[in-house]
Image (cartoon, rainbow, N blue to C red):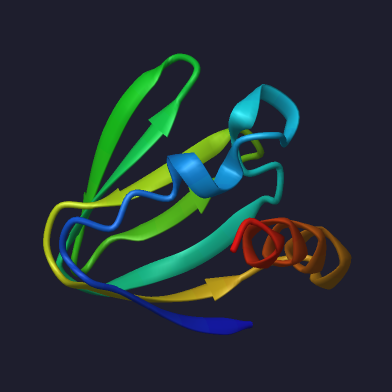
Amino acid sequence: MAFVQLPQGTDLRPALKGLTDDLCQCPHWGYMLKGRLKMVTKDGEEVYEAGQAFYWPPGHAPVALEDCEYVDFSPTDDLTAVIDHITSQG
């Protein structure tokens, strides 16, 4: 489980380069607490807003349209692999 805060303008697509399809491959279940977030996939884009529950299957990249906060439930090993990739981009 994670509590995530992304400031407006955050685009994680560059940090995900090098993963399969250059997208996050970890599934996420959660709830948007604050803000608006655009989720980019190979099939298009969808916007999530405060008050919405979500499921993001593997193959996505978030872009914060506003300051965002959400709670996220994800498989530990899958999430760790993505976080390790992102932090190695430094």
Image position, residue 89 (x, y; %): 63, 56
> Looking at the picture, does residue 13 appear above or below residue 53?
above
Image position, residue 58 (x, y; %): 66, 38
State the residue in front, 15 or 90: 90
Residue at 31 percent across and 27 percent down: it is 45
Q: Is residue 39 left or right of residue 77?
A: left
- Which residue is situated farthest in the front direction here? 90
> Looking at the picture, does residue 17 appear above or below residue 45?
below
Q: Which image quarter holds the N terminus?
A: bottom right
Image position, residue 69 (x, y; %): 29, 77
- Which residue is situated farthest in the top direction here? 43
User: In terms of image quadrants, where is residue 24?
Assistant: top right
Residue at 39 percent across and 48 percent down: it is 62
Residue at 70 percent across and 34 percent down: it is 18
State the residue in front, 84 or 57: 84
Image position, residue 88 (x, y; %): 71, 62
Residue at 16 percent across and 71 percent down: it is 67
User: In terms of image quadrants, where is residue 90?
Assistant: bottom right
Report the number of numbered marks. Answer: 0
User: In terms of image quadrants, where is residue 29?
Assistant: bottom right
Q: Is residue 77 left or right of residue 6?
A: right
